[in-house]
């Protein structure tokens, strides 16, 4: 039997087209490590976080070969690395200030992974690696309504794709929403060590909400574009009609 591959089974979340579109992302559980600073720093916190995430992720995946059998286990491809990014005092991110990044690195967990299974995997990885894995968290998160598309090319070229996402959202009657628990979200589909920069594939996903009809064009202009726009629209979000990902309601559960 082929290993279950989340990228192929949930293409609406992992393989969007290069043109922006709306998507409603349901609840998922993740391995997560929080940190800050430049992700390109050699031996820095970001690189250390990735090492911890993958160690725990593969401890779970390879449990099929050990004595500790997990209830409900099915063979699967470890999902791709994801990242939530923000900067204090700013809506969205400024790519020129990588040292100011706050981030949460993520790897999606299969459905059979409970908090008990997670705790076992952390203990197992710590014993095997003789390393502290306490920064790794079990993180339930329901992302909700977003606009996303595939970005092709270097990470530093992402602002053009972000601008296209923002323009599409505005044309559809939405605005970017970086309120509590909502972030600039990236999903990394390419191995940066083996892929030419111009061929890197990254899902860019930005949270949105329905734009308040009381906002005038002048007020929107004053709010600015990505990185500065804020709104006090009291309207609730739609339940996903005509949006990829279904019509289920959502809550934000990203703590701290």
Image: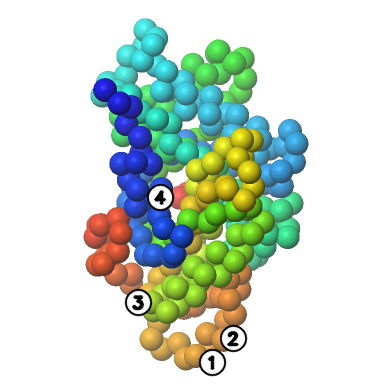
Circle 4 sits on which residue? 15
**Vertical order, 84 against 107 (above or below):** below
Nearer the camera: disc 3 or disc 1: 1
Q: Secondary structure at mark 1?
A: helix
Q: Which mark is residue 218?
A: 1
Q: Secondary structure at mark 2?
A: helix
Circle 2 sits on which residue? 222
**Mark 3–mark 4 contact, CB under 8 Å?**
no
What is the C-alpha distance between the residues marked 2 and 1?
Answer: 6 Å
Who comes first in sequence, dot 4 or dot 2?
4
Q: Residues within 10 Å of mark 1 (few under 14, many from 20)?
A: few
**Vertical order, 26 against 113 (above or below):** below
**Placement of the N terminus among the 4 image quadrants:** top left
- The residue depicted at 32 percent of the width and 31 percent of the height is 4
What is the C-alpha distance between the residues marked 3 and 1?
Answer: 20 Å
**Mark 3–mark 1 contact, CB under 8 Å?**
no
Who comes first in sequence, dot 1 or dot 4?
4
Circle 3 sits on which residue? 235
**Vertical order, 242 against 133 (above or below):** below
Q: Which mark is residue 231?
A: none
- The residue depicted at 32 percent of the width and 45 percent of the height is 10
What is the C-alpha distance between the residues marked 1 and 4?
Answer: 36 Å
- The residue depicted at 55 percent of the width and 13 percent of the height is 127
172 horizontally vs 187: left or right: left
- The residue depicted at 38 percent of the width and 24 percent of the height is 117
Nearer the camera: disc 3 or disc 4: 4
Who comes first in sequence, dot 3 or dot 1?
1
Who comes first in sequence, dot 3 or dot 2?
2
């Amino acid at each position: 039997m082929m290993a279950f591959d989340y990228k192929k089974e949930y293409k609406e979340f992992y393989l969007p087209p290069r043109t922006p579109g709306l998507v409603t992302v349901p609840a998922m559980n993740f391995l997560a490590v929080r940190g800050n600073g430049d992700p390109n720093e050699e031996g820095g916190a970001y690189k250390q976080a990735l090492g911890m995430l993958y160690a725990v992720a593969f401890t779970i995946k390879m449990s099929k070969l050990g004595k500790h059998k997990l209830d409900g286990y099915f063979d699967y491809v470890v999902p791709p690395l994801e990242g939530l990014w923000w900067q204090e005092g700013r809506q969205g991110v400024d790519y020129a200030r990588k040292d100011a990044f706050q981030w949460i690195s993520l790897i999606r967990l299969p459905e059979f992974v409970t908090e008990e299974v997670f705790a076992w995997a952390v203990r197992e990885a710590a014993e095997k690696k003789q390393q502290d894995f306490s920064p790794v968290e079990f993180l339930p998160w329901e992302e909700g309504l977003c606009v996303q598309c595939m970005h092709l090319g270097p990470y530093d070229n992402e602002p053009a794709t972000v601008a296209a996402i923002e323009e599409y959202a505005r044309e559809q009657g939405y605005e970017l929403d970086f309120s509590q628990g909502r972030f600039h979200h990236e999903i990394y589909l390419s191995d940066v060590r083996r892929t030419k920069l111009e061929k890197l594939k990254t899902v860019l996903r930005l949270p949105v909400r329905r734009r308040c009809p009381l906002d005038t064009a002048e007020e929107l202009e004053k709010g600015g574009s990505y990185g500065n726009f804020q709104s006090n629209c009291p309207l609730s979000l739609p339940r996903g009609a005509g949006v990829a990902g279904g019509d289920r309601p959502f809550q934000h559960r990203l703590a701290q």
